[in-house]
Image (cartoon, rainbow, N blue to C red):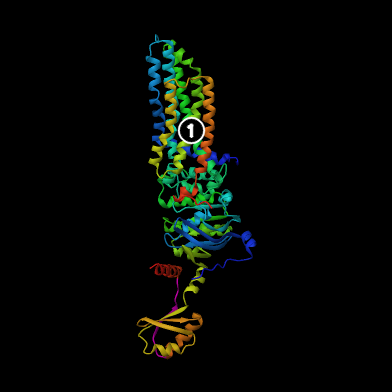
Amino acid sequence: MRALDATRVWAVVHKELRDYRRRRSIVVTMLVLPCLFLINPVLTVFFTPASTASSTLDKTISISLIFFLIIPVIMPSALAAYSVVGEREQGTLEPVLTTPIRREELIAGKAAAIMLPTVALSYAIFGLFLVVTQLFANPIVASALFHQGPILLALLLFTPLLAGWAIVVGMGISVRASEIRVAQQLGMLASVPLIGLFLLLAVGVIRPTFLVAIVFAVALLLIDVRAARLVARMFDRERLVTGAKAARP
Amino acid sequence: MKQQDDAPRSGTRGMTDQTALVVNKLTKRFGERTAFSDVSFHVAYGEVFGFLGPNGAGKTTTVRTLGTLIAPTSGSATVAGIPLTPENGVEIRGSISVMPEAPGLYLRQTVAENLEFFAGLYGIRRAGPQIADALDAVNLGDRAGDLCGGLSKGLRQRVGLARTLLSDPKIMFLDEPTSGLDPVATREAHDLINRLRERGVTIFLTTHRLEEAEKLCDRVAILSTTLRSIGRPAELRERLFRRSLVIKTLAPLDQPGPLFSSVPAVESWQCDVPGTYELAVTDPRAAAPEVTRSLVSAGADVLSIGEVQHSLEDVYLELIDEDVEVRR
C-alpha cells in the first residue's frame, strides 16, 4: 500500500474544518448534542443518595458513564454521512476527483476532519464532567466514580475508536448513497452496535475489567482499520461522477 | 462522412512522445447505452483542439474518460505520454487539469481559499505565488478575499478557469469555459487560451459556441456518439461544401443557362431567388473576373459578386442534420 501524501490529506482536513466553522448549524449541533447525553450522568452523580449500597452505587455510576460513549458515535454520524454524497449533490466533488488525490487520501482527510472536533469535544466534555464531580458532588459518590477504573479506561480508549467506527460507517454509506437525506438516515445505523454493547453492560453480561476494556479496544481498532479499507475500495470515481457503476474488465 | 485525422504522424511510438493525446478506437457504454463509440484522434502539444457536438453526443463523457474519472469500455489512449490505465490515474491527473462545465466551488470559502485547497490537492505547498498568478491571468486579482457564494456566475467561471492554471498542466480540458461570461470576459478568456497555446499548453476545448471554436481552435472534431469529422475548420468547409460564387443582378437574366455554360470555370449553377445566382466553381478567384466579363458583355447590370463563405456552424449543422436524418 502506497503512503498517503501529507500535503493532499492536510489540504482536505484544512478545507473541511474551515467549512464546518462557517456552517452555524454544524457548530451548534456539535455543541448541543453532547449536552443531551450529559443529563443522565449529571443526574446520577448529583441526585444519587450517598447512602446507596456500595454495589448499587457502582453499577448506577458505571451505567451512567456509558452515556459518554454515545457522544463520539452520534456526533460525527451526520457529518460523515454528508461528506461524500453532500459534495456530489453540491457539484464540488467532480473538480476534486480530477486532481491527483487518491481515494484513500480523500477519505483519510475527510475522516480526520470529522474525527478531530469529535474526539476533542468528547474528551473536553468528559473532562469537565470529572472536574465538576470532583469539586461539587458528594465525596462518597465522587469517590465511587473515580474508582470505576475499567470504565474510565474504556472511555479513554473507546472515544476515538467509536468515533472512527461511526465515521467509517457514515462515509461507507455516503460513497454509495444517492442523496444526502438517505445517507444521514442510514448513518444512524452506526450506533446500533453501541446500543448492543450498552445493553450487555447494563444487564451484566459483560463485566467491565481492565482486560475486557483493552481486548475490546484492540478488537475495535482492527474493525476500524478493516472497515476503512473497505470504504476506500467502495469509493468508485465513476459511480460518484455518473451514478453508474464502473464496468470491470 | 469518414472520419479523418490529419495530425502529424510519425509512427505510433514517436507519436506518443510528441503528441499530447493519442486516442485509439475509444468506446464507452453504460449498459445498453453508448456514450461514444470508436473514437480516434491525436492532439499535438501546443494545439487548441475543439470538441464539438450536440447535447448528449458524448463530449463530457470523453473528457471524463481522458481525465481518468471513468474507465473506457474498450479502446486505448495516451494522455501526456502516459497510457490511460487505472494504475496511471494519479500520474495522468497530475499532468492535466480539467475544468468541468459547472465550476463546483465551495461557496462558503473565499476565492483564495478555494484555490489554496486545490493547490494542496496538486501537492503544492505555500501556493501564494501560484494563486496570485492564476488570479491575475483571469483578472480576478482584486477578488481573492471574496466569498465564492457572493460571486456572479461569470466570476465563478473565471475562478474555475484560474483553478486549472494552478498546477501548470501540460494539457487542459476546458468544458464550456466561456459559458456565462460577458463579452469582455469572453475575450479575456480567449486571450488567455491563446497565451497558453504560445506556452505550449495543449487545450482540449469543449464548446457549443461555434464562432469561438472557429476563432480559437487549430483543429476541431465533431462528435455525435461517433466522430463525424475532424480537421482544420477551413478543411472541413472544403470537404463538405463546393466552392461557389454568389452573383446579384439588377434584373433577372434572360438566358442564364447558356451564359453560365459558356464560362469554363463554372461547373453548375442554380437560382432560388430571381436575380440571385449561385455558381459552383473550382477556383472562385479565377472564376469571378471571367463570370463578370461574361455578364457585362451580355448586358447584365451586376450588383455584386462574391465567394460564398461557409462558417463552421454550416459544417456543424450539415453533419448533425445528417445524423438527425439517419435517426429518423
Examine the rendered structure and indicate whether residue B167 appears above or below residue A25.
below
In x, y percent, where is residue B223? Answer: 47, 63
Residue A17 visible: no
Q: Quadrant of residue B101?
A: bottom left
In x, y percent, where is residue A183? Answer: 41, 40
Q: Residues within 10 Å of mark 1 (few under 14, many from 20)?
A: many
Amino acid, disc 1 = Trp
Task: Tell me the quarter of the image containing the C terminus of chain B.
Answer: bottom left
A246 to the left or right of B271: right
B192 to the left or right of B149: right
Instruction: Please name whichever residue, B6 or B233, is drawn nearer the observer in this view of the structure.
Output: B6
Residue closest to the far top: A51
Q: Chain of mark 1?
A: A
Instruction: Please name whichever residue, A190 or B205, is drawn nearer the observer in this view of the structure.
Output: A190
Residue closest to the far front: A205
Residue A170 visible: yes
Residue B46 counted in the magenta span: no
- Judging by the rendered image, the residue that carries numbered circle 1 is A165
Examine the rendered structure and indicate whether residue B228 appears above or below residue B283.
above
Identify which residue is drawn at 40% across, 90% down. Answer: B299
**Which region shows up in magenta?**
B298-310
In x, y percent, where is residue A15? Answer: 49, 39
In x, y percent, where is residue A90? Answer: 42, 45
Examine the rendered structure and indicate whether residue A3 appears above or below residue B210.
above
Count all numbered tags in the image, as a single digit. 1
- Where disc 1 sits, the SS reads helix
Examine the rendered structure and indicate whether residue A167 appears above or below residue B247.
above
